[in-house]
Amino acid sequence: MKKLSSMLMVGAILLSLLAACAPAPVVETVEVPVEKTVVVPVEVTKIVEVEPEEVDYGLVTFISTQGVPIEEAEAMRGVVLADFPGQVEFIGAEYEHFEDLVLSEVQAGKGSIDVAGALHGQFPTLVAAGALQDLGALMDSLSDRGIPEAFVELGKLGTDTQYYVPWMQATYIAAANKKALEYLPAGADPEALTWEQFRDWGKNIYEATGEKKLGFPVDGLLHRFLEGYIYPSYTGGMVTTFKSPEAVEMWEFIKDMWQYVHPQSMVYGFMQEPLLAEEVWVTWDHTARLIEAFKARPDDFVALPAPSGPRGLGFMPVTVGLAMPVTAPNQEGGEALIDYMTRPETQISVLREIGFFPVVDVEFPGYVPIGIRMEGEAVTKQAAAPNAIPAMLPVGLGPRSGEINKIYRDAFTRIVINGEDTVTVLESEAANLQALMEETGAPCWPPDPPSVGACQVK
Amino acid sequence: MKRRRVNWEPYALLLPSTAYLVLFFAWPMVQAFKLGFQSDDGQFTLAYVQRMFGDAAFVNALWNTLKLIIAIIPLQFILALIMALLMMERLRGSDILAYVYSIPLAISDLAAGLIWFSIFTERGFLNSLLYSLGLLERPYLFLNYQSYWPLVAIVLAEVWRATSIVFVILVAGLQSIPRDYIEAAEVFGANWFQRVRRVILPMLRPSIQVALILRTLLAVQVFAVVMALAGRGVTVLAAEAYRWHGEYRNPHMAAVYAMFILIISLASAFFYLRALRVKEEAIL
């Protein structure tokens, strides 16, 4: 009896604790996210004769560094790959496992992997190990898909051989709550902002509401903002201009802007969460880390191209390619899978399921959720901007490609957060950057002009 | 002289745990030392150690880790001792207290960090409560990296989460103290404080030693709670080791950080063993 009564007491205490903790809404009630479906009448313009396909390509093993989270891998297997005539074994793997697997199969001379999907910057190690086939003939057969020449060129990794076929792309854009629009600086076009106007936007909001509403994913992909957006926008380069006078000016600007940045930014990994919680109104992040906000409440947010700086609109397109290891056991099946993955309908299904944008020429059909179309339009506008400066993910650093991020992040922490002297910090971090370049022998990559030998910080 | 036959039985019983320790602790430790002192071409090098001491994040990480240890351990120890003594008084409902105290034991440290994040975040429980009571006009930014609040939040979360471990160890220790001693002290007129100071605490020494060593080791490794509550705002040694391995992809540097954590842990364990030395004859 005693036991029972004490357990009941514990239950009662827990219940009362829970009741006391129930959150009461602060300031504004948050709307329950509702999926919006847009019904667009479809007009039949072309009748396509469908012939039943008899081919079966058998087992095709497809390993990828993208689509790793469980929901994405499930979507790949259940939706994207469902119509492929054959049986696709999709394996999502973190880069280190991916690299180990592909390289060990090639070293063993006998493999199970037919198709390997990875980021542009993840291929050079495989190419250096002689692990990838020449896909030139396959690429030629896909010439009617409308893949931009720049992307095809990227797939050659600076050689004459087509090592990968571009598969999908993603990038980073700006996003804003519509409530912020009334505080836009006078005369500013939200679709063609400068970073100064972006700061003034935050300043206006702060002066009107007393709240710091700009947000950055400091615990997320902040290093990409530094490497691919603000550096090219202000200095025209990434590595060579690391400690240039323009860079000093740029850091002073970031320090100034940081007065209006939400102090909880240090904890933000994915900006969709603070956007939905309305802690942040104006932000920048990867499309895949903003998509939930656009999906949940498309009427409340706008997707915008990233702002530009004095030198242009620096942006980082992330391209994902498909390659075939030299040891692929199912050559025909692998090629058929790459063909399948670059068809417009597959590309749209990839966009819907894992949020990567097509590399082929597609029209977004009405059934593509509005949130994704919103992002798609911002991505296209950003890439097509007349002053666009595409910046590539660091290439050629091999296993040390993570260390470059630390250098940009350390510079940020020391200058902006700790308030150390900009010139001193840039001098010391430039030495680290130069050492990294020398030790890996990495030549410059865009937006820095090509170099002979290791890239040099000027 | 007849040679005594060696009794193999105890060794056979020790073998599985020894094998386990060698395989999963000693061997990885040797590997970590190798990683930390060997360059990629197999040469002995101190470059990684030097690089760690020169690392922009190192001083901050070390300083924050020490601050957390200094703030958390005494607080937890005193709280756990009070809780344990309360338990021993056999007050009405003290069983329930034991249940309530033990709830956080079942929660992983990351989950604990996330719970406290949802309390302290801008639109979290605490701000909601203060706002609905009319004490705040707009949410207060507790997790502002420019303030001391993130550290305070981490200390609170850690105290909430791990005080019960200390509590459980101390309760076990208290229960093993024979009642006769306490009753004898009572007979001689010792009041409650005198009994605690002169009888209970000295006899509790072995448990205190275990509890402090365990807690300090865990505090040196504090990680998930910090990551969840402060992100990049507060860095600690374990977080830097993790980032070097997972983000910056340099296992050598991660190994050097891990070794540094190991050295601090060993030093603190050694310190407690010396400071709270238990004489053989004192143990009954």
Image (spheres, rainbow, N blue to C red):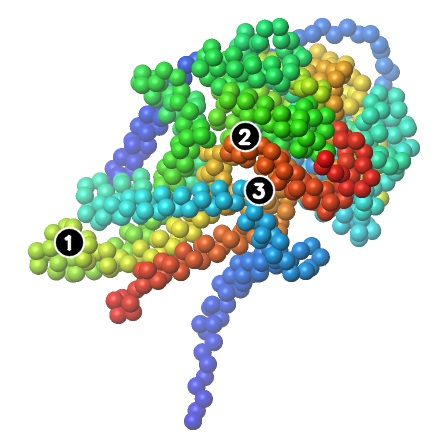
| Residue depth check, mark 2 versus mark 3: number of the one nearer the observer | 2
Give the residue displayed 50% in from the left and 65% down from the top: B18
| Residue depth check, mark 2 versus mark 1: number of the one nearer the observer | 2
Residue A25 placement (x, y as % from top left): 40, 17
Marks 3/1 in contact by CB < 8 Å: the verdict is no
- Asked whether residue A297 appears in the rendered view, the answer is no
Q: What's under tag 2, amino acid-wise?
A: Val
Mark 3 residue element: helix
> What residue is disc 2 on?
A416
Residue A81 placement (x, y as % from top left): 74, 29
Q: Using the numbered discs, state the Cα–Cα distance from disc 3 to disc 1 in whole angstroms.
A: 50 Å
Give the residue displayed 77% in from the left and 41% down from the top: A454
Q: Is residue A208 left or right of residue B249?
A: left
Q: Earlier in the sequence, mark 3 or mark 1?
A: 1
Residue A157 placement (x, y as % from top left): 82, 35
Mark 3 crowd level (few <14, some 14–19, many ≥20, 10 Å Cα): some
Q: Using the numbered discs, state the Cα–Cα distance from disc 2 to disc 1 in whole angstroms.
A: 55 Å
Q: Confirm whether circles 2 and 1 share one chain.
A: no
Residue A251 versus residue B136 in the image, above or below: below
> What residue is disc 3 on?
B243
